[in-house]
Amino acid sequence: MKRIVIAIDGYSSCGKSTMAKDLAKEVGYVYVDSGAMYRSVTYFCQQKGWIVDGVVNEAELAKVINDLKIEFRVNPETGKSDTYLNGENVEREIRSLAVSNQVSIVSAIKFVREAMVAQQQAFSKDKGVVMDGRDIGTVVFPDAELKVFVTASAEIRAKRRYDELKAKGQEESFDAILENVKQRDYLDENRAESPLRKADDAVVLDNSNLTIEEQKKWLLDLFNERAK
Ligand code: DC
């Protein structure tokens, strides 16, 4: 079997990261959550007070963007990969609705995308990587051997995010989450820099009515075919 690069793109909260993580674990590849990187930059800006009335202080952010150290480390207690920003575990903070509500404006900034894409490309030096996001198959790894574009209805995605936050004790209103999902779909698809698009050679998966086990098998079969 050859080592390949797998790009999983799609709408927010459609289960991309679950699929990507499961596959990476199953086949012993590195998993990279590119959304967590944009979320970390957003959280950093919020901590600094650099987002005021929906406007980011780009001058200040530009000075430090290349020094932000974003890493993924496996948490021995949960067996899951946590996101670290400048050495601090920010996994919980970056999943909050406060970050979700502002991540689209930060991820639309050109120099932020350039810095993140450079870091993302460095993860694939030795191939054997599964990365999920919005522009992985189109911009980050246009030559990826396997590209998947995932979608599901907005209501189903909002319900999944609602359940996920609730399970972590972060209860939010379903309507606020649905609004956020729709808003991010619009912003992700309509931004000037690297908008969310299906790559021409991506395989589409609508997982509205699939169980996690079913989608896991679907992806593993595809992987086995492409990595042969
Ligand atoms: O996958 P996610 O919902 O955690 O991503 C958070 C946000 O980051 C999403 O609203 C859009 C942005 N994003 C992006 O612009 N490009 C990526 N490759 C990944 C995420």
Image: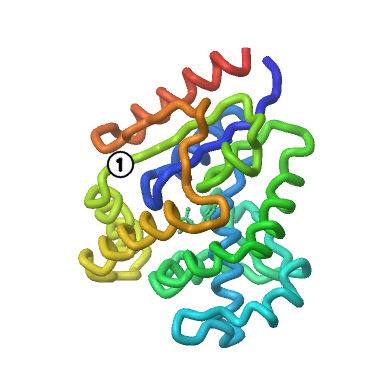
Label 1 secondary element: loop
Q: Position of residue 121 (x, y in %)?
A: 72, 45
Q: Which residue is depicted at the point 40% across and 52% down?
A: 12
Location of residue 177 by image quarter: bottom left
User: Dot 1: few (<14), some (14–19), or many (≥20) neighbours within 10 Å?
Assistant: some
Q: Position of residue 188 (x, y in %)?
A: 44, 55
Q: Position of residue 110 (x, y in %)?
A: 63, 62
Kind of residue indicated by mark 1? Ala
Q: Position of residue 201 (x, y in %)?
A: 52, 26
Q: Which residue is depicted at the point 55% across and 58% down?
A: 36
Ligand 1: does it lie within 8 Å of the C-beta at label 1? no
Q: Quadrant of the N terminus?
A: top right
Q: Quadrant of the C terminus?
A: top right
> What residue did someone put label 1 on?
152
Residue 55 vertical position relative to residue 190 in the rendered view, above or below: below
Tell whether 188 sits left or right of 33: left
